[in-house]
Image (cartoon, helix red, strand yellow):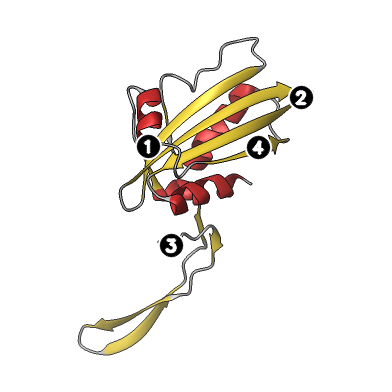
Amino acid sequence: MGYGVTRGNIPLAPLIFIVFLFHSYPDEYVLEDLDVSVADYVQRAMKANFGAAWEEVGAENELEDTYDLASMRTLDEAVKNVTKFLGMQPCERSDKVPEARSSHTLLLSGVFRGGVEVLARARLALSEGSVTMQLAVRSGDADVSELIASTVG
């Protein structure tokens, strides 16, 4: 099942209205471009027990990949940016990075358009001034897992 999710900048055509008062005439309104990201398709959803939810969804539709987040210099910056980009809810206070750590695990939960539960586990490691992320995504739908995982790369 394809979700037809659009990402990026969408140039919008002008909206055209026909005004009916006493006389009709066409009127045109130009709109600004619209930026759409994966976060626009995800609703945050809190999970009290992420581990149980992770096991319940199962590994059938799990995708995992590693990414170099070269523009991010700290684990805290990476946590904030990944959370915002994916539009998911941090679970079990995993959005709080303890000080003086060189690695951290971020647990995220959400509901994708159409009511599909999606979970993500991001293992972050700080090395030589940049962050590497191993992202694992699970959901009830393989297409959703693929979409979430592929938007990062």
Q: Position of residue 29 (x, y in %)?
A: 42, 73
Q: Quadrant of residue 122?
A: top right
For the residues carrying marks 4 and 2, which lies nearer the camera in this image? 4
Tell me which label, 3 or 4, sits earlier in the chain.
3
**Circle nearer the N terminus (1, 3):** 3
Give the SS element for disc 1: helix
Marks 1/4: CA–CA distance: 21 Å
Q: Earlier in the sequence, mark 1 or mark 4?
A: 1
Q: Is residue 116 above or below residue 81?
A: below
Between the C-alphas of marks 3 and 2, the distance is: 38 Å
Q: Which residue is situated farthest in the top direction here? A: 100
Proximity of marks 3 and 2: CB atoms separated by less than 8 Å: no
Alpha carbon distance from label 4 to label 2: 17 Å
The residue where tag 4 is placed is 66
Rendered residue at 41%/78% (across/down): 28
Secondary structure state at the residue bearing disc 4: strand
Residue for point 37% across, 45% down:
140
Q: How many marks?
A: 4
* Amino acid type, label 4: Thr
Q: Are marks 1 and 2 in contact (CB under 8 Å)?
A: no
Dot 3 falls on a residue whose secondary structure is: loop
What residue is shown with label 2?
Answer: 129
- Tell which of 110 and 71 is nearer to you: 110
**Residue that badge 3 annotates:** 2
Left/right placement of residue 88 relative to residue 132 reads left
Looking at the image, which residue is at 50% across and 34% down? 83
Q: Nearer the viewer, mark 1 or mark 2?
A: 1
**Residue with the mark numbered 1:** 57
Q: Nearer the viewer, residue 124 or 30?
A: 124
